[in-house]
Image: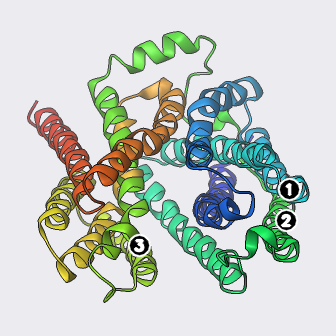
Amino acid sequence: MTTPNEQSNKNIAALVMLTILMFLWGIANNMTGTMLQNFRHIINMNDIQESIIKSAFHAAYLFAALPAVIYLYKKHSYRATILLGLILYAVGAMFFFPAASLESYMVYLIAIYVMATGCAVLETVANTYIVASAPTHDKGIFRLNLAQSFNPLGSMLGIMLCQYIMSDSSAYNSNTTVNPEIIREELDSITILYAGLGEFLLVLLVMVMFVSIPTTDNVMLGHKGKDLRESVRRLFRINNFKYGVLALFVYVGAQIGVWRLTIPAISEQGGTYNADYLYTCSMAGFAVSRFIFTWIMKHHSYKKIMLWTSICAALLSLAVIIGDGMVVVASIIGISCCMAPMFATLFGMSLENTGRDMQTGGAILVMMVVGGSVIFALQNILAARLSAQMSYILPAVCFLGIVAYATFALLLSDKKSSA
């Protein structure tokens, strides 16, 4: 029989392990996006091929989340599902060896997709476990925000690793496409970076095998997913969940759009501003703000925090559209800071009152990461037809949608309190 203290120790060990995983998929997401700029020139990708690769990461989340939860239900084991995610992540990273050797677009695409599938499996398990294993739902949302605070630190490390390699490379030299030595040097640099990541993942995989992680029976999920279709139907009868799915979809779209068009929007303000440096500042603001908002969450309602940050993000997006120079720069950095608590809090808010279907709900929410591809594609069209600065009208609309959801959640909470 497991004592409460033993169970608590298992939960702590699992939370630490899952926090490390969040750090790692932050590396994968941003390292891949930044490295793509280099790889495009080496293997002569056209715009369509580049857009497919950019979409592959988000598409993996769409297609892998529900199979991941089915696998979890079948094995009744978080450990087995985490190991599966780590194996896929490591295999995807190792696929950069043949991609570099063959200089093949298709192998590179497979590598990205397999690696993203591993991340999707890990995130499907991690986010929901952290919320479900907490003694109260409020505590679960706080824990998820704390764990997710390490994700942007991984993102920044991924960006810095790529920038370090690029600073020593000749990827943008006009002779790159005709000089085999430069191409080989660049491919070797990329391969070594991903191989190192893959080796670290294998070490982590061995560590997971020796960490005590509770089974699904020890976490209050209550539903083993024998009828996934019925579970999905029950979930979409819950307004809080149904609207939360839409809110998370538009949030991820807004986040990707804001970040990917940060450099173009700042560059449009003239050569006075170092767009690359300011993008790094924006990411740093996001990382620091996550810890700040997590601390604030200990003393204030997460629903009110969501409402006010989404209002500020919408207003700052409008400031980008109508502003100029430093107003645009400061507003873009401010949007990143406001986005800091949104993903984890929206995720947790959407799962409130989902009860026995919480794990299925978590998988559906993870699928909404595909919003990053769908909404960014629309924003990219606006940027091409108008300007990167004017395209921020789409994130503004997305943030207004989150304002509506946060308002709905607060009104629902007040109605329950008065009942």
* Amino acid marked by disc 2: Ala
Q: Are marks 2 and 1 in contact (CB under 8 Å)?
A: yes
Question: Residue 344 bears which disc, if any?
Answer: none
Circle 3 is placed at which residue position? 291
- Answer with left or right where residue 186 lies relative to residue 26: right
Amino acid on which the number 1 mark rests in the picture: Met
Mark 3–mark 1 distance (CA, rounded to whole Å): 33 Å
Q: Is residue 288 visible?
A: yes
Kind of residue at badge 3? Phe
Q: Element type at marker 1?
A: helix
Front of the two marks 3 and 1: 1
x and y percentages locating residue 316 in the rendered image = 18, 65
The tag earlier along the polypeptide, 3 or 1, is: 1
Q: Mark 1 Cα within 10 Å, few/some/many (few <14, many 20+)?
A: many
Separation of residues labelled 2 and 1 (CA atoms): 6 Å
Residue 169 lies, with reference to residue 374, above or below; the image says below
At a point 79% along the width and 41% down the height, the residue shown is 84
Pointer 2 residue: 195
Q: Residue at 54% x, 33% y: name it.
A: 363
Q: Which mark is residue 94?
A: 1
Task: Say whether disc 2 or disc 1 marks the residue closer to the N-terminus.
Answer: 1
Q: Is residue 138 in view?
A: no
Crowding at dot 2, Cα within 10 Å, few <14 / some 14-19 / many 20+, comes out as many
Helix, strand or loop for disc 3 = helix
Q: How many marks?
A: 3
Residues at marks 2 and 3, CA–CA distance in whole angstroms: 31 Å
